[in-house]
RNA sequence: AGGCCCAUAGCCAAGCGGUAAGGCAACGGACUUUGACUCCGUCAUUUCGGUUGUUCGAAUCAACCUGGGCCUG
């Protein structure tokens, strides 16, 4: 009997993952991860949690315990607070310091859930690890193929785009064929306490925060002006790293006309560039340079047509890609894309198949580089 | 000093005698394993710079005051 360790989070998805694996005849054990410690990590500003109440993490652990008991599986608990800080959060802060918009959850999967966790799971002894992601995987003799989750609205392959073949070879995604509704229905049928629990959001393991305040715990304010494209001062900001391209809220610019959006960052002069209108031309680009390439598909040379997703839950766009060098690609998209932002991932797809992941570095409109 | 114009919520702004549109911002919610986007809701009734008056009824008319702007000396 093959043994699987499931990352049991205390949510409904991983609980149903256990059920699916049991139905398929695996021996299942759970492993709960704790990766963030608010007091050790100085997570004070922007933290909505009442320090007197049971913290959400412990509630999650209790929920995981209850699920484990009900489904009759052993539950391990592991602590990666240090690893998370060193390998995910440092990167996260560094990217913000460079005025980019990082995606910590992609790194969390690469460094924690499918690395540190995998090591611990192997120590306990297992053939596979499994997570409650909405994604599908096919294992062949010469590798593994990652596919979008069946539920188009919940597909989480964007976050899995930096996993290596080695990592994928050990991974199972038992709920990838299900819709969110089906997952909840199964949980209800098994009378699980988490069946109607609200989906967790926010940075994985950290949780919901007032984002700007949260960043201020680690990155001090650097006040400056907001200017429009003509150079007129239209507002003030307290640090251009707190904003991302395409952002509308939090600018506080009132007055006449359409809403204002972040359209760029003048890092030299500490100026946040803003423009009016959701269709502002500076929001759009048609070419970008990506690096940190994790290609999962068949090797290719020259140009390749496929689709790409530049931001989680944003629709794919058709692109033509080509290598510039070993770890750098040019991505062209003639129909233009909105708010393509350095630091975010560019994930390539061929239909349902995930071809690979990368990180956006430079963004262009024709030959003009965007000040993103 | 004289003449003209303007004063509506944090900002922009409709209204022109019949009982305060709309937009921006903000806030709340939905959505969401990156708090980007998007969507929904709330937001002037001791109220229309102030006071007094005309009128059944005034943000809307009149007078004066205050505060801005412009023109002529």
Image (spheres, coloured by chain):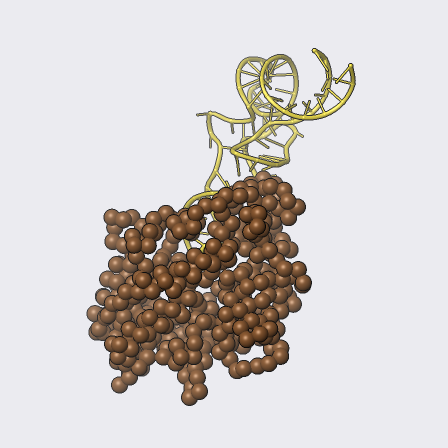
Chain colours: A brown, B yellow
Quarter holding the N terminus of chain A?
bottom left
Q: Is residue A115 visible?
A: yes
**Frontmost residue, A184 versus A13:** A13
Q: Position of residue A282 (x, y in %)?
A: 62, 55
Work out whether residue A168 or residue B42 is closer to the camera in this orientation and state it: A168
Q: Residue at x 28, y 61 (%)?
A: A60
Q: What count of labels does the image hold?
A: 0
Q: Could you say where residue A247 lies in the image, as x and y percent from the top left?
A: 53, 52
- Name which residue lies at 39% across and 77% down: A167
Q: Is residue A6 above or below residue A63?
A: below
Locate residue A46, reporting x and y percent. 38, 48
Q: Is residue A253 visible?
A: no
Q: Is residue A80 left or right of residue A355?
A: left
Say which residue appears at 67% left-offset and 63% top-offset. Answer: A366
Up/down of A247 relative to B65, above or below = below
- Residue furthest bottom in the image: A141
Toward the viewer: A154 or A3? A3
- Residue A316 horizontal/vertical position (percent): 55, 68
Q: Is A298 left, or right, of A106 in this rendering?
A: right
Q: Out of A39 and A29, give the one closest to the viewer.
A: A39
Res A136 quadrant in image = bottom left
Q: Quadrant of the C terminus of chain A?
A: bottom right
Q: Residue at x 53, y 61 (%)?
A: A342
The image quadrant that residue A182 belongs to is: bottom left
């Amino acid at each position: 009997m093959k043994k699987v360790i499931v990352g049991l989070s205390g949510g409904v998805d991983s609980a149903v993952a256990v059920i699916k694996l049991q139905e398929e005849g695996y021996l299942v054990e759970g492993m709960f991860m704790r990766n963030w410690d608010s007091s050790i990590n100085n997570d004070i500003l922007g933290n909505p949690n009442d320090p007197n109440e049971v913290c959400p993490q412990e509630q999650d652990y209790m929920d995981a315990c209850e699920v484990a008991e009900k489904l009759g599986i052993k539950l391990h608990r592991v602590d990666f607070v240090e690893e998370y800080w060193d390998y995910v959060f440092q990167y996260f802060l560094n990217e913000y310091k460079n005025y980019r918009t990082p995606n910590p959850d992609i790194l969390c999967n690469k460094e924690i859930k499918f690395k540190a966790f995998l090591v611990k799971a192997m120590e306990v002894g297992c053939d596979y690890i499994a997570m409650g992601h909405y994604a599908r995987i096919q294992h062949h003799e010469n590798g593994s193929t990652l596919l979008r989750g069946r539920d188009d609205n919940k597909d989480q392959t964007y976050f899995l785009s930096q996993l290596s073949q080695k990592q994928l070879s050990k991974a199972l995604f038992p709920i990838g064929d299900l819709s969110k509704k089906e997952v909840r229905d199964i949980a209800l049928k098994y009378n699980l306490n988490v069946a109607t629990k609200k989906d967790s959001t926010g940075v994985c393991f950290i949780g919901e925060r007032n984002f700007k305040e949260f960043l201020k715990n680690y990155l001090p304010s650097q006040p400056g002006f907001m200017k429009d494209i003509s150079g007129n001062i239209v507002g003030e900001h307290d640090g251009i790293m707190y904003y991302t391209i395409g952002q509308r809220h939090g600018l506080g610019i009132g007055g006449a006309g359409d809403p204002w959006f972040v359209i760029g960052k003048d890092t030299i002069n500490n100026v946040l560039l803003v423009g009016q209108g959701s269709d502002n031309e500076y929001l759009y680009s048609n070419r970008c340079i990506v690096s940190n390439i994790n290609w999962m598909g068949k090797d290719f040379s020259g140009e390749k047509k496929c689709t790409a997703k530049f931001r989680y839950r944003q629709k794919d766009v058709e692109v033509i890609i080509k290598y510039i060098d070993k770890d750098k690609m040019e991505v062209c998209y003639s129909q233009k894309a909105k708010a393509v932002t350095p630091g975010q991932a560019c994930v390539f797809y061929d239909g349902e198949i995930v071809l690979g992941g990368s990180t956006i570095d430079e963004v262009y409109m024709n030959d003009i580089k965007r000040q993103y």
